[in-house]
Amino acid sequence: MSVAEVATNEPNRGFASGVDNTVLHIDDVHKSFAGLHALSDVDLDVRQGETHAIIGPNGAGKSTLLNVCVGRLKPDRGAVVFDGEILTGKQPHEINQLGVARVFQTPEVFPDLTVLENVMVPALSKRDGHFRLNPFAGFAREKAIREEAENILESVGLQAQLTDAASAMSRGDKRRLELAMGLIQHPRLLLLDEPTAGMARHDTNATIDLLRKIKEGGMTKVIIEHDMHVVFSLADRISVLAGGRIIAQGTPEEIKNNPKVKEAYLGEEQV
């Protein structure tokens, strides 16, 4: 099974046609910490099948926004709606069950498990299956998940490390491992928080290629990323956060040429 096949969950419903096909709607979200406004008046729509990048300087509120989306933080005001269902107030595991998966800024893996076991865990914990009535059905299910996990690990370039302990992996490899852990959940929406942070350039380029393959499968993705090479290589649309507010949204070309974005974040030399 290829990465593109793993990513295919449902048709890309009119993304290129311009019809309204919003799958994630963030409506007037506010979040403060001890009087500091981390997010203010945030409105953002993500369309089915697109790769939507969120960029901005450190402290702009990007990771806070993802934490609100996955239920780790409750907004002071506003709502997050995924495919018509309000996520605000739901627990992280409930949001995950609806088809939203997140790859964290700091890789969250099980250090004492092998690479293969790390990928199998989220699949075994998420999908239905009972050992009580028919233990052989349970064995067959585990075998199928193991085979899928091996295929995904091959797709992300980790097939040589299946039996290695995750604790022995480099930071870049741990990021690829966590991506594999997200993919095996077959999410309808994948949230990636700086997926190439700490990677060497050749690993970054390999990750770009991998995420392009996922895009071919039609999976909707939101990416937070500081590396503009990654952003402009992958994004269909970009939202720019600064001081907790959206200051610009548009295509990569529109963002490159936006004077407010240049002043607040990109800088003339980066455009």
Image (cartoon, helix red, strand yellow):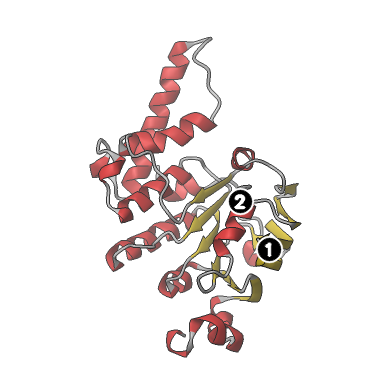
Residue sitting at 63 percent across and 53 percent down?
69
> Looking at the picture, does residue 52 appear above or below residue 249?
above
Residue sitting at 70 percent across and 68 percent down?
40
Residue type indicated by callout 1:
Asp
Q: Residues within 10 Å of mark 2 (few under 14, many from 20)?
A: few
Q: Residues within 10 Å of mark 1 (few under 14, many from 20)?
A: some
Q: Which residue is mark 1?
A: 45
In the image, 2: left or right of 83?
left
Q: In this view of the protein, which residue sits in the foreground, 35 or 245?
A: 35
Sequence-first tag of 2 and 1: 2
How many tags in the picture? 2
Residue type indicated by callout 2:
Pro
Q: In this view of the protein, which residue sits in the foreground, 135 or 72?
A: 72
Residue sitting at 70 percent across and 50 percent down?
83
- Front disc: 2 or 1: 1
> Looking at the picture, does residue 3 appear above or below residue 78?
above
In the image, 194: left or right of 257?
left
Q: Which residue is mark 2?
A: 11
Which label is found at residue 3? none
Q: Position of residue 191 (x, y in %)?
A: 54, 54
Q: Secondary structure at mark 2?
A: loop
Kindly give the residue lying farthest to the front in the view shown. Answer: 34
Residue sitting at 68 percent across and 63 percent down?
45
In the rendered image, is residue 238 in sight? yes
Q: Are marks 2 and 1 in contact (CB under 8 Å)?
A: no
Q: Quadrant of residue 75?
A: bottom right
Q: In this view of the protein, which residue sits in the foreground, 13 or 35?
A: 35
Q: Secondary structure at mark 1?
A: strand
In the rendered image, is residue 49 in sight? no
